Amino acid sequence: MWKTAIDAHIRTAETMRLDKELENQLQQAASAICAAIRRGGKILLFGNGGSAADAQHIAAEFVGRFYLERPAINAVALTTNTSILTAIANDYDFSSVFSRQISSFATEQDIVIGISTSGSAKSVLAGLQEAKRIGACTILLTGENGKEGMADYVIPVPSQDTPRIQEMHILIGHYWAEYVEKALYNDKL
């Protein structure tokens, strides 16, 4: 079972490595993240379940550091305030837990990253829709069934297997953290 999981991970990563269109999308999204940071915007991330944990992990890479000692980058996972999450879910419904926060926290200078392995999580799609309404740049990290047009950048991991998709989402988050550090801080530190 262990080797089977590793083999599946490697196959998914190799498929991504060879996909030039996906590579282009990843680089364009990384450039958009840099642009948001340059203009003083923040990175807002969210998802459900494992994707909520991934949002927190990726935010931590930006706020703390990845490789370089550099200024903290304003990144917030919208999955961490249980009072806000439960109040919105109770007073409205769960599909509003991210869109309500986006309407409160996001500006057109920000970049908003929704994470959904299926690409169909109502709360994630509603959050991205609200971010687009505000004028923020949007990214959807998803699996191969993700919906085109749901964000400015849709990054589909070529798999339908949730664990493999989530593993690649963290790889992508790490790639973005390294890209941002090198693009914005490598020659300044």
Image: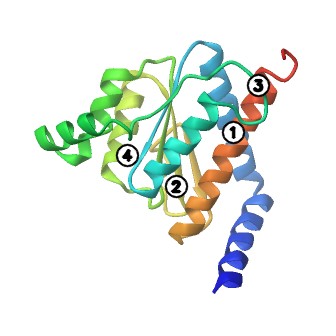
Q: Is residue 116 left or right of residue 16?
A: left
Q: Position of residue 55 (x, y in %)?
A: 50, 44
Q: Nearer the viewer, mark 2 or mark 3?
A: 3
Q: The residue under label 3 is which amino acid type?
A: Glu
Q: Nearer the viewer, mark 1 or mark 4?
A: 1
The first of marks 2 and 3 along the sequence is 3
Q: Is residue 102 left or right of residue 70?
A: left
Say what secondary structure mark 2 lies in: strand
Relative height, residue 160 to residue 60 (above, below) = below
According to the picture, the residue beneath numbered tag 1 turns out to be 176
Give the residue drawn at x 68%, y 70%.
Answer: 9
Q: Are marks 2 and 4 in contact (CB under 8 Å)?
A: no
Q: Nearer the viewer, mark 2 or mark 1?
A: 1
Say what secondary structure mark 4 lies in: helix
Q: Position of residue 131 (x, y in %)?
A: 40, 30
The first of marks 2 and 4 along the sequence is 4
Measured in 3D between alpha carbons, the distance from the residue under mark 2 to the one under mark 3, in whole angstroms, is 30 Å
According to the picture, the residue beneath numbered tag 4 turns out to be 124
Relative height, residue 97 to residue 118 (above, below) = above
Q: Nearer the viewer, mark 3 or mark 1?
A: 3
Q: Are marks 2 and 1 in contact (CB under 8 Å)?
A: no
Q: The residue under label 1 is which amino acid type?
A: Trp
According to the picture, the residue beneath numbered tag 2 turns out to be 142
Q: The residue under label 4 is which amino acid type?
A: Val
